[in-house]
Amino acid sequence: MRPKAAARAAVLTAIALLAAACAGPPDGPVESVRTRTPTALERAALTAHDVPGYEISGAASPDDTRGAPRADRAACAPLAEVMGGAPDDRARATVSRGLGSRRSPGLAVSASLSAYAPPDAGRLMDGLRAALARCGTGFGTELDGRRAAYRDVRPVPYEVQGDESVSWAASVLAQGAPAPVHIVVVRRGATIVRFMAINLSGKAPPDFSVPHDIADRQLAKLIRTTED
């Protein structure tokens, strides 16, 4: 396999494993647009032009309605649900992208935008903060018979634009070995923006996190398109 083809294969593999580690389905596209998605969300979602150095993989699929993983502890349900097809069942529409890094093999990131009623967006953030305070010892998830175990769940600081944000890190068992995961959820008005990153290289730095070039550009594009 030629170097360029090998790099692309690694990117696609990393993205697929991100979906699996976060209790998604074993097959199907990573990029998805749920039915009845407002045009504004589509315009605000990242494209390859916005994030050079990353490959956005998959095709739009209105039929892709990934469910919500179930937590094995009720107190941790918000943390499990936010890793599903939508942050929770109050989301009115969601647009998602999967990104693989060309520079860092094994790094995969997902970024999504969800439309909410204003009170529901605030309740989602409150629920995440409450769950984080109770779930430091970890929790398990299951979706369609696929299980994942999250350990060392802890809030971590992450500077980002928005009205409020919640950020946490964990270790998830992937391919028989633990891999670091970082999740950031941001509220801007009634829009919820999620970022989920996993590093499967086995060489992640101690401060592994969602790359700021993805988070900052996504939020800047959201602000720019909603103010146009």
Image (cartoon, helix red, strand yellow):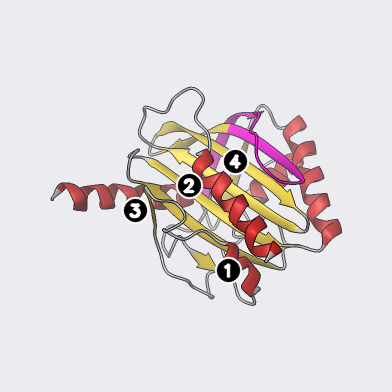
Q: What's the amino acid at mark 2?
A: Val
Question: Badge 3 is on which residue?
Answer: 12
Predominant SS of the magenta segment: strand
Dot placed on the residue nearer the N-terminal end, 1 or 2: 1
For image coordinates 53% across by 34% down, the residue present is 209
Give the tally of numbered discs: 4
Q: Are marks 4 and 2 in contact (CB under 8 Å)?
A: no
The residue positioned farthest toward the right in the image shown: 119
**Is 106 one of the magenta-colored residues?**
no
Residue 109's disc number = 2
- Closer to us: 82 or 57: 57
Check disc 3 and give the amino acid type. Answer: Leu
Q: CA distance from mark 1 to mark 3?
A: 22 Å
Distance Cα–Cα, label 1 vs label 4: 22 Å
- Circles 1 and 3, Cβ within 8 Å, touching? The answer is no
In percent of width and height, residue 70 lies at: 65, 51
Distance Cα–Cα, label 2 vs label 3? 11 Å
Which of the two discs, 1 and 4, sits closer to the camera? 1
